[in-house]
Image (spheres, rainbow, N blue to C red):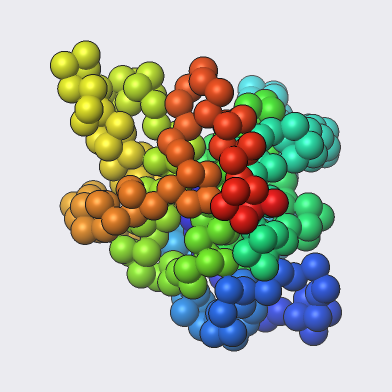
Amino acid sequence: MVYSAQCSVVSEEAKKDPDQPPAATQKSQPGSVDNEKNEVLDPISWGYDLYPERRGEKYKPSWKNILFRGEGKETFDKLSCEENVYYCVKNSPLVKLMLGALKSSGCAVNLRRHIACEVCDPSVSGGYDPLLNQVVICQNVARSKGMVQGVLTHEMIHMFDYCRNNLDFKNLDHLACTEIRAANLTHCSFLSAWHQGDASPFRVQQQHQECVKTKAMQSVLAVRSVTEEQARAAVNRVFSRCYADLEPIGRRIRRNSTDMHRAYLEAPFYGYD
């Protein structure tokens, strides 16, 4: 999932941050106020309301949520989220592959600078903020190591696309393309497609593509104020080209397979160390 945060002012210290990765071209630098194409005038229509801490607000649960939803443990949840992130960085083949691919592409990731655990709207588990070049892990939703691995991999595909392909997230087709790639490479399997209603034993060849289309359309709808018809049309316009693009993982990851490990071992052959 991708969103764009409203951030009209960046301090001089942030501009000079040595941990800020360079962009693939001089025209667009992730996290720079000069990147006018990603300025957001209506944060709600861009999904920014799903990430309240992106607005500089400190989440304060109501007493009802503390009593009935078990909230009020935000500090503990943040520490647990950060521990899961560190575990995935050290142990997940997919996360390590994505970190290597970003570094080889000139966009090395610094954990303290580029990954943030925050309280989000319960409808999302994570996001990518191209203005600040940060992956957001929703600490109140992605609580297990497996979920954190999925969020990190998904959002770092968006980060990779932004680094390598100079994406314009105001362009609905660009957004649909990166969501197609993320769903294609990390989410859809026969089981997940079955749960979404996109698979049957008689349509095996089509189920993966339909799962990817459904997942990409849902992600676009979650963060953009567009109709279902507009989201579906954008996905269909770019589907063939974006579905065929398997960089940097190189294969579609099947559930309960060795695909993650094989992709990680093969990464150096494609220049992703």
**Which is nearer the eye, 101 or 170?**
101
Q: Quadrant of residue 102?
A: bottom right
Q: Is residue 238 left or right of residue 41?
A: left
| Residue 61 place in picture, x, y as percent | 69, 39
Q: Is residue 7 visible?
A: no
**Residue most extreme to the left:** 202
| Residue 41 place in picture, x, y as percent | 47, 75
Residue drawn 67% across the image and 68% down it: 106
Q: Is residue 22 visible?
A: yes
Residue 89 against residue 55 in the figure, above or below: above
Q: Quadrant of residue 150?
A: top right
**Residue most extreme to the front:** 269
Q: How many marks?
A: 0
Q: Is residue 129 left or right of residue 116?
A: left
| Residue 20 place in picture, x, y as percent | 74, 70
Residue drawn 81% across the image and 80% down it: 16
**Which is nearer the eye, 165 or 218?**
165
Residue 126 against residue 211 in the figure, above or below: below
| Residue 253 place in picture, x, y as percent | 47, 32
Q: Quadrant of residue 62?
A: top right
Residue drawn 52% across the image and 55% down it: 158
Residue 6 against residue 208 in the figure, above or below: below
Residue drawn 25% across the image and 35% down it: 210
Residue 159 against residue 90 in the figure, above or below: below
